[in-house]
Image (tube, rainbow, N blue to C red):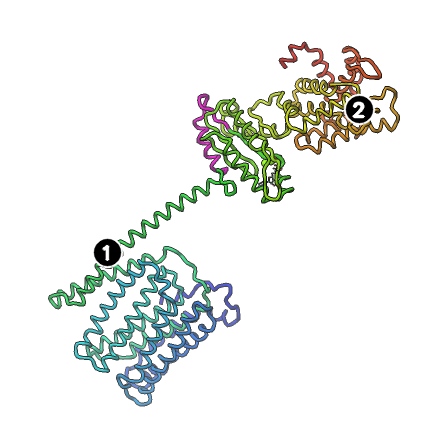
Amino acid sequence: MPTIKVLRLPAPSTAPTSDRSRLLTPRRVAIVGAAWIVTFAVLVLALPAEGWPARVLVNGVYLIPIVISEALIIRTARKVPSPRRRFWILMAIAGPLTLAGEVVVSWHHLVIGDEPPLPGLPDVFFISYYVVLLAALVFGLRPARQLQSWRAALDASIVAAVVAFVSYDLLISPQLSSGVTSTQLVGLAYPTMDVAMLVALISLALASFGHIPWSLRLVALGIVTATMGDDALTYLSIHSVNVEVGWLKIAWTTTSVLYGAAAWQACLEPAEVRQQSGRGRGAGLALVAAGVALTVCTVVADLIIEGGLHLEAAILVLYVFAAVLVRLWVTAREREAVSRELADSLRLQQRMANTDELTNLANRRRADATLAELARCAGPDRPLGVLVVDLDHFKEVNDRHGHPAGDAVLIDVAGRLRGAIRPGDLVARYGGEEFVVVVDDVTPAALRGLAERCRAAVGDEPFSVRGAASVIVTASVGGAALPGDATDLGTLLRIADRALYTAKALGRNRAHVGARTAPEAGDDLLERGSVPNFLQALADRIDTDSGSAAHTAEAARLAGEVADRLGVGAVGRWRAVAAARFHDIGKVAVPREVLGKRGPLTPDEWRLIHDHPERGAQILELTSDLRDVAPVIRQHHEHYDGRGYPDGRTGEGILLEARIVAVCDAWAAMRADRSYRRALTEPQSLAELHRCAGSQFDPHVVRAFTAVVRAPAADRAAA
Ligand code: GH3
Ligand code: MG
Ligand code: MG
């Protein structure tokens, strides 16, 4: 019995784990049920049809599975959750009716030794049983809700029409021909109820697309088995064939076993049946095909046997023909709808796969694909540009205003970048707060212009977010072009990234495009932005108060040239220049009288002066653009031999930029008139630097400085 195997479903996690349930596994229940059916069948076949052993078997033993299955059904009706409970309650009501009918029949056979009257009390019980069973199928399983699909309803109607017709033709019509008596009415009731139940089953099966739980499949199998027994009995009685009831009882006892197994299984199934769309459609088609084939057979049989089509067959043919046509139309429309849905969902998925959820910009995947495609066509005639835009100190925006505000800024930045690019360029969100602009066919000048536009779009206008009226967010932009700066896509991205790093290191809120880090890359920072402007004004004021106007401007100019001579790169150069310009900012805390004092300083006054590197560093740490310059300022009074302040660092332990500033600071001081002495000449100053090289100054820096000072002005300009 292969269907019994289906009971080997995995038990849901809610299944009880008592000893009893471990003993009665679905497999064991299946084996016991199958063994019972086989034993019953063997005994029916082995025992002589007459005599008490056979009578006890088919009337007494036969009742046992009915009683057990009823007990199991009642248990299930109490245990299963509500959507399925109604069905099992109706099944539990139906059970005693069939049991009562069977008991009356057995009473007649065993005690009275006679057949029950026809129609009689057992028929009342059996027909009531069928009515309740039908109600269980129709109302307990809510077919109306499941019959939502036109196709399923049509399939069901075609198959039901054929089943009804065959039943009518074979079982009902012959009984009607000889007038309707009460006996015949009862005879008609059985096949009619069978047809109704089969139709209900077919409708349910076709409407549920294969989502039928195994418990219901077992019930359906039980109903089909019982129906086969009933209809065989009706058919044989119509044709006056004397049939051994024991044989038929094999079918009916199978039904009882199947009901019991179904009830057992129902308790193991999860409350909600998982939907598996698309399954079971083939079964509907197969049933319809079988229905059509059966209709054709009926027509052919009618034509051969009766020489023409009788009315019922003609109606069936017309109906099946029309329904199949409608079915084809419905299927075609369903297919169309499904392909439309598929196409829509594919489009949506493609869009989602290429779009950043937060900003609605293209995402990294799309940017990479576009870059790869354009890189293939890029050449001297059609350079490909890429800009990497990274928001500055964005973590602080989140920390200060919260993540949602940060998100709102990101959305706004996306809109601004979209507005800044040319039509046809692609802007994508590449990572958290990093954007990429892909620019096809762009000249270096246009790429630089675009980079600056992107920077300005973000940094020049504060953002307004909920709860914080105005948030200043700036962006650094790095850019590169293929083939101008790179030979392949990987290098292009690396160079754009390095350019971004340069822009960041140069103080942020700036754009830097190209592989070459131009020596003057950082200079303009000192001319832009309110904070650097303010600090420069302050530095100039301190210079004036100290009696050496333009001291720091001169030191900054020299620091740039020495940094170039030492080849420290754009970032180091910028730091050296900025540090030289602002190295005395800490003197803002020193009273003007002390700064401009002619005579020797008191120890307290010296202490004030010695504090200025630290104070200067503290001031620059408060800015966002010049924060990286702070450590250089702190160290610009350290001595190469460790005798400087504030930390007593030595040699390479002092930042190179600070060693450069130290030399340039000293030179600018020596070369200017001071309140307490006249300016030294160039040779005197150089001699002093060389005297202190290795003690106060880095000899390497002093050598570079000497080369700078001695180089003719034209060479310096060229450098
Ligand atoms: P830098 O100027 O060096 O780029 O500083 P930064 O703070 O921007 O750089 P870092 O890479 O350290 O931090 C990036 C921050 O961006 C971290 C995270 O808080 C923020 N961020 C990344 N993705 C999102 C996002 O989807 N929403 C929000 N609100 N913040 C994000
Ligand atoms: Mg950032
Ligand atoms: Mg970043």
Q: Nearer the viewer, residue 662 or 110?
A: 662
Please say whether residue 167 is one of the residues in the magenta stretch: no
Crowd rating for badge 1 (residues with CA inside 10 Å; few <14, some 14–19, many 20+): few
Q: Which residue is tagged 2?
A: 641
Count of numbered badges drawn on the protein: 2
SS for tag 1? helix
Q: Nearer the viewer, residue 93 or 315?
A: 315
Amino acid type of disc 2?
Asp
Crowd rating for badge 2 (residues with CA inside 10 Å; few <14, some 14–19, many 20+): some
SS for tag 2? loop
- Give the alpha-carbon distance from disc 1 to disc 2, as whole Å: 102 Å
Q: Residue at x 78, y 13 (%)?
A: 685
Check the image and report above or below for 611 versus 235.
above
Q: Is residue 570 left or right of residue 205?
A: right
The segment highlighted magenta reads: 363-385
Task: Where is residue 611? Give x, y as percent.
Answer: 80, 29
The quarter of the displayed image where residue 164 is located: bottom left
Q: Nearer the viewer, residue 670 or 497?
A: 670
Task: Where is residue 584? Give x, y as percent.
Answer: 76, 25
Q: Nearer the viewer, residue 245 or 628?
A: 628
Q: Specify whether residue 453 is in view.
A: yes
Q: Nearer the viewer, mark 1 or mark 2?
A: 1
Q: Residue at x 34, y 63 (%)?
A: 205
Q: Which residue is tagged 1?
A: 325
Amino acid type of disc 1?
Leu
Give the prevailing secondary structure in the magenta stretch.
helix
Say whether marks 1 and 2 touch (CB < 8 Å).
no
